[in-house]
Image: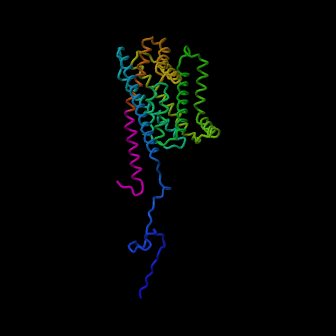
């Protein structure tokens, strides 16, 4: 004997379907999707968000175009100025100048990366160099503030906190300024800078650079405590490496400047120290000046210091050549690291995808 078990679920039917034999026994009422677990918004909010994204994209493109126009204009100005100068150079000295300048341009972003890593932020070397160089081109725009905004925006896209990026900018600028002052104290002659001021400047700069990792760590801890900023306490070892990278970049650039001067000017070995000191006096003055990238300020300081030894013509020529060399090399280096950073970023993304469980090509 078979037994049949019928489970009848009672439900409400429409009144007109109570005695209708064609109505199925089980009636499924219409249901709406649960909106509690979904995201969405009104049409107006979606349109507003779309226009905001388009506006941001337009602003980014305007910044890129403005930067390209300014960089092109600066390059054309340097080209026209150099055409009026009868240049004679020794190719032998340009090779070490090229190597030293390349090393200096590479050490700066790597030092900035160490500062970022000190705050427990992840950033690989290739994207860090590419990000740094892309933002650095905006320093030729008026006030130089756009270079800071570009670094903040690009770093935020890479997943770096804006607070950490801003802190790293302050640390990087202070470290470079300290190293520039130390070079000035060592190489600028006493006829330009009195000896007692050189001793004071050199002692303060060296002491500040040595204790900077612990001083920065203490300052970040105090700022996080009283200003309620989400700024982790940095690792002093990483900060020390970042400051050391900045010093290595300054040293390498000084060597490149000396080789460039020997290649273009008829100077003796006794003039090397003067040229290095004048160059970094101009760099330090350009960092304080209000002109974008220190344009005009650096060249004026270099010419004023070198004129008494080399003459006004050679001094002004070297100031112009050193700036044009730096500018041209920045553009070439930017093109190279843009490819390198993008290639490393795509490789890291591919390795992430392949390392995921169940990932398939």
Which secondary structure class fits the magenta region best? helix
Residue 73, by quadrant, is top left
**Colour scheme shown:** rainbow
- Identify the residue at image location x=49%, y=14%: 304
Query: Which residue is more in the foreground, 207 or 50?
Result: 50
Quarter of image, res 130 = top left
Q: Residue at (58%, 20%) from the top-left corner?
A: 198
* Left or right of 114 in this view: 66: left
Camera-side residue: 194 or 40? 40
Residue 159 in the figure: left or right of residue 87: right
x and y, in percent, of residue 285 in the image? 52, 21
How many marks the image carries: the answer is: 0
Where residue 17 appears, as percent x and y from the top left, is 43, 70
Q: Nearer the viewer, residue 242 or 151?
A: 151
Q: Nearer the viewer, residue 212 or 42?
A: 42
Residue at the image point whose x is 60% and y is 21% from the top: 199
Residue bounds of the magenta highlight: 335-361
From this view, report whether residue 338 is shown above or below residue 204. Answer: below
Q: Quadrant of residue 234?
A: top right
Position in image of residue 188 (x %, y %): 53, 19
Question: Is 347 inside the magenta-drawn segment?
Answer: yes
Specify the farthest residue to the front: 16
Residue at 48% in and 40% down: 156
* Residue 117 part of the magenta-drawn span: no
Q: Is residue 108 above or below residue 267?
A: below
Q: Is residue 58 above or below residue 70?
A: below
Task: Tell which residue pokes out farthest to the bottom in this image.
Answer: 1
- Residue 166, image x and y in percent? 53, 35
Q: Locate the N terminus by quadrant.
A: bottom left
């Amino acid at each position: 004997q078979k037994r049949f078990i019928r489970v009848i679920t009672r439900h409400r039917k429409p009144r007109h379907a109570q005695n209708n034999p064609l109505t199925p026994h089980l009636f499924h009422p219409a249901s709406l999707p649960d909106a509690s677990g979904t995201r969405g918004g009104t049409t107006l909010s979606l349109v507003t968000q779309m226009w905001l994204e388009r506006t941001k994209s337009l602003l980014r493109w305007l910044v890129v175009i403005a930067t390209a126009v300014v960089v092109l204009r600066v390059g054309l100005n340097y080209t026209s100025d150099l055409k009026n100068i009868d240049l004679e150079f020794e190719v032998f000295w340009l090779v070490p100048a090229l190597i030293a300048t390349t090393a200096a341009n590479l050490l700066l972003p790597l030092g900035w990366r160490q500062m970022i890593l000190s705050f427990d932020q992840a950033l690989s070397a290739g994207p860090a160099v590419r990000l740094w160089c892309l933002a650095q081109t905006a320093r030729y725009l008026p006030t130089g503030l756009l270079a800071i905004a570009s670094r903040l925006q690009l770093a935020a896209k890479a997943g770096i906190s804006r607070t950490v990026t801003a802190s790293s900018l302050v640390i990087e600028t202070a470290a470079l300024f300290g190293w520039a002052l130390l070079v000035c104290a060592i190489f600028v002659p006493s006829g330009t800078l009195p000896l007692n001021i050189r001793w004071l400047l050199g002692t303060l700069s060296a002491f500040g650079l040595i204790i900077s990792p612990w001083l920065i760590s203490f300052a970040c801890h105090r700022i996080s405590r009283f200003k309620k900023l989400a700024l982790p306490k940095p690792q002093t070892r990483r900060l020390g490496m970042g400051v050391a990278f900045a010093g290595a970049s300054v040293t390498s650039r000084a060597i490149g400047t000396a080789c460039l001067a020997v290649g273009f000017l008829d100077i003796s070995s006794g003039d090397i120290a003067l040229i290095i000191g004048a160059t970094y006096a101009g760099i330090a003055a350009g960092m304080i000046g209000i002109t974008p990238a220190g344009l005009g300020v650096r060249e004026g300081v270099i010419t004023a210091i070198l004129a008494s030894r080399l003459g006004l013509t050679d001094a002004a020529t070297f100031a112009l050549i050193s700036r044009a060399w730096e500018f041209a090399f920045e553009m070439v280096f930017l093109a190279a690291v843009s490819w390198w950073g993008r290639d490393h970023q795509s490789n890291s993304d591919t390795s992430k995808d392949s390392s995921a469980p169940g990932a398939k090509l």
